[in-house]
Image: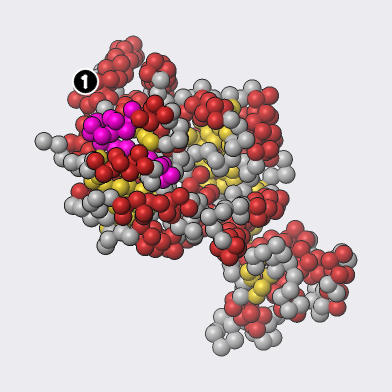
Amino acid sequence: MDNKYTILKNTFGYDAFREGQEVLVDSTLSGRDVLGIMPTGAGKSICFQVPALLFPGITLVVSPLISLMKDQVAALNQLGVHAAYINSSLTEGQYRKAMEFARRGQYKIIYVAPERLMTEAFQLLVQDVEVSMVAVDEAHCISQWGQDFRPSYLKIVEFIEMLPKRPVIAAYTATATKQVKEDIVCILGLCQPTLVVTGYDRKNLYFAVKKAKDKKGMLLGYLKKNGDKSGIIYCNTRKTVEEVWQCLIEEGYPAARYHAGLSDLERKQSQDDFIYDVRPVMVATNAFGMGIDKSNVRYVIHYNMPKDIESYYQEAGRAGRDGEPAECLLYYAGQDVKVNEFLIGIQSENSELDGEELELIKERDLGRLRKMAFYCFTNECLRDYILRYFGEYGSNYCGNCENCLTEFEDIDVTEEAFHILRLVQACHERYGINAVLDAVHGSDTAKVRQFGLKQNPEYGSLKGWALVRLRQVLNDLLVKGYLLLTNGDYPILKLTRLGRELISYGIGGSPPYGAGRGEVHKIILKLPKEREEAQSPKEEKKKKAQAEIRYPDLFELLRKRRYELAQKDHVPPYIIFSDKTLREMGASLPVTEGEMLAVNGVGKVKYEKYGRDFQEIIQDYARKKGIK
């Protein structure tokens, strides 16, 4: 008789559950609601798919995107699990057939778009069949405070209330702040749910921010070294997607493109070309990627800064889903902030929300945009910045981001900081960044004259300092919380409690810093030392990882065979076996059924379908190389 362990091994090919999975599976099977917050690639789907195969009735998985459903259903069918999806991509005939098979009990798992839940045909279906569980994927979409709020997700609550018998409710998401977490529990009406937060950290991902004047040149330089790998390049407008895609095509790179301006057919072709490794480089807006389970994405490049940390981490997390090393690079330019402010301003075309709600969401989005911009300025650990945003606190050193691997020198900028803060105070906190910097620098600009800043006692107090340096100091004051920038069309600099304290300490020891505290208060700015690119620790680490791959030529043979089988069966290569599974085969050289089944990701169904093909390649390779 099947249990959770036999399902995990025989169907999915895994020997053991990963962190957090078993607790969620056990709670679900016991009839308890659950909320799982797990980073991309941590195995959320296993948490509801394993119980679904053990429950007597069907499991409905509410999912926001057609591509996500198709991908998940294709993967399940490859594993021998009967699954289907119900969404707008089906023809009338396909829809009727799917409903008929569902009524006969042929499916254990049905993926459904939230818009379809309240249709008459679907309502008739769920009155006739037993619904054991409703799993809500991308559950952050139900919260107005989530980065991807979808009013259609509110239909889930109404749908559950109309079912003859309340099923187990399982909610899952990769990113959720404290407020979003509370919203999910409250709005979905989860009953004393088991809450599992496995942590947001993805240790295999390398993070870097690149401030580039020539983004295209930087991108082409990166692809010259990594052109043989699969990756995603995110742009924030359709126009930029077209420009970058055209540039890559002209340079001979096999690139696909994806944005809302293309026809359904064009988008589907682009997505298929990417998933099937026909065109392993995807240039896209954020309309692409949710639910794409492509495991061998080796890099995600944000050509433009996204609008918030949640979106950035979710999109960056599409790299390295197989657990192998991957890179997440962000190309930053000041114009990115302006473009995002514009996009936030025009997104208020949602008829399901009133004016007050739209204004509230706009204010929230602008605040999150500021925190995203601060990520691009900080010289502290990039990973730690992201984790702190989600409420996790680490050591401020990860050893796998650009800042941690860069040698910095500490510079005391207390004097510059003091004069900037004093100027903000003296002008009664009424002006923005550029006006403040121009004034403290002693510039004679239109804004300085318009606002009468030449009369400010701090005007020209830092005349001898470079404007670039002063901007770095001001950015550091924002990141460290001495200043804050208001939201709205005209962001204004305001002093925080920390900023007021620094002013009250004085400068030059009169009154002394830390008066009454016995210590001097200093503002230290970390600036990177110059070093040769070829000598960077990141490059050394990368070379070492490449050197550790055992039998690289065998790995390529296995990849080639995987691609041939994928073409034959019309499925994405990673659905047959992930790169991680192929690497394990290449390292352990399994030549018997038992040895092959011991490899992570090889279950009985996949062994019967594909295992012997790979076994023969490994046996032939070992024989030719004289390996016993």
Q: Is residue 418 left or right of residue 205?
A: right
The residue pinned by badge 1 equals 592
- List x then y, in percent, for residue 463: 82, 68
Q: Which residues are magenta?
A: 97-116
Give the answer, above or below, for where 85 lies relative to 489. Answer: above
Give the answer, above or below, for where 401 lies relative to 190. Answer: above
Q: Give SS at disc 1.
A: loop
Compare residues 71 and 65 and report the one nearer the observer: 65
- List x then y, in percent, for residue 545: 45, 35
Q: Residues within 10 Å of mark 1 (few under 14, many from 20)?
A: some
The kind of residue on which mark 1 rests is Thr
Q: Residue at x 55, y 84 (%)?
A: 518
Residue 438 inside the magenta-drawn segment: no
Give the answer, above or below, for where 461 lies relative to 118. Answer: below
- Residue 124 sits in quarter: top left
- List x then y, in percent, for residue 526: 62, 60
Q: Residue at x 28, y 50 (%)?
A: 163
Residue 615 visible in the snapshot: no
Compare residues 133 and 273 and report the one nearer the observer: 133
Residue 114 inside the magenta-drawn segment: yes
